[in-house]
Image (cartoon, helix red, strand yellow):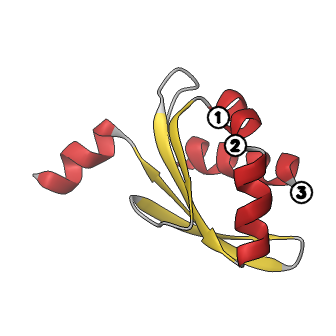
Amino acid sequence: LVREFIRSVQDFRNELKLTPQEKVELYAVGEKNLEKILEKHSALIKKEISLLEFFAGKSEGVKKEITLDGAKLEIGINHKHHLNIENE
């Protein structure tokens, strides 16, 4: 489940044209049991996705809905490039 989440987020990073070196804030909101699993593995998620921070239970930034193990989850990515665009 965690590997599937990481792959989905990496695909989303690619859609946003982010390089692997660009650190971002990642948000995930969905069923509470999914959020708990992701929080439990937050160190692995941060390491694999090159994150500044990971927030489960909150939603900010550029958003996308994904499905994990049959459950819907909204992920959001905040990156300084996208923040600058939104604030202009």
Ranked by sequence position, the earlier of labels 3 and 1 is 3
Q: Name the residue rendered at 66%, 49% in the picture.
A: 9
Q: Amino acid at mark 1?
A: Lys
Q: How many marks?
A: 3
Q: Which residue is mark 3?
A: 1
Q: Nearer the viewer, residue 22 or 55?
A: 55
- Specify the amino acid type for callout 3: Leu
Callout 1 touching callout 2 (CB < 8 Å): yes
Image coords of residue 71 (percent x, y): 80, 79
Q: CA distance from mark 3 to mark 1?
A: 15 Å
In the displayed structure, 17 sits above or below 36; it is: above
2 or 3: tag closer to the N-terminus: 3
**Is 3 situated above or below 49?**
below
Q: Measured along the vertical axis of the image, is residue 36 above or below residue 70?
A: above
Residue identifier under label 2: 42
- Whole-Å distance between the Cαs marked 1 and 2? 6 Å
Which residue position is annotated with label 1? 46
Determine whether the residue tagged by mark 3 lies in a helix, strand or loop.
loop
Task: Work out how far the residue at label 2 is from the one at label 3, CA to CA, in angstroms.
Answer: 13 Å
Q: Which x, y percent locates residue 18?
A: 49, 35
Coordinates of residue 41 in the picture (x, y in percent): 78, 45
Q: Residue at x 21, y 49 (%)?
A: 85
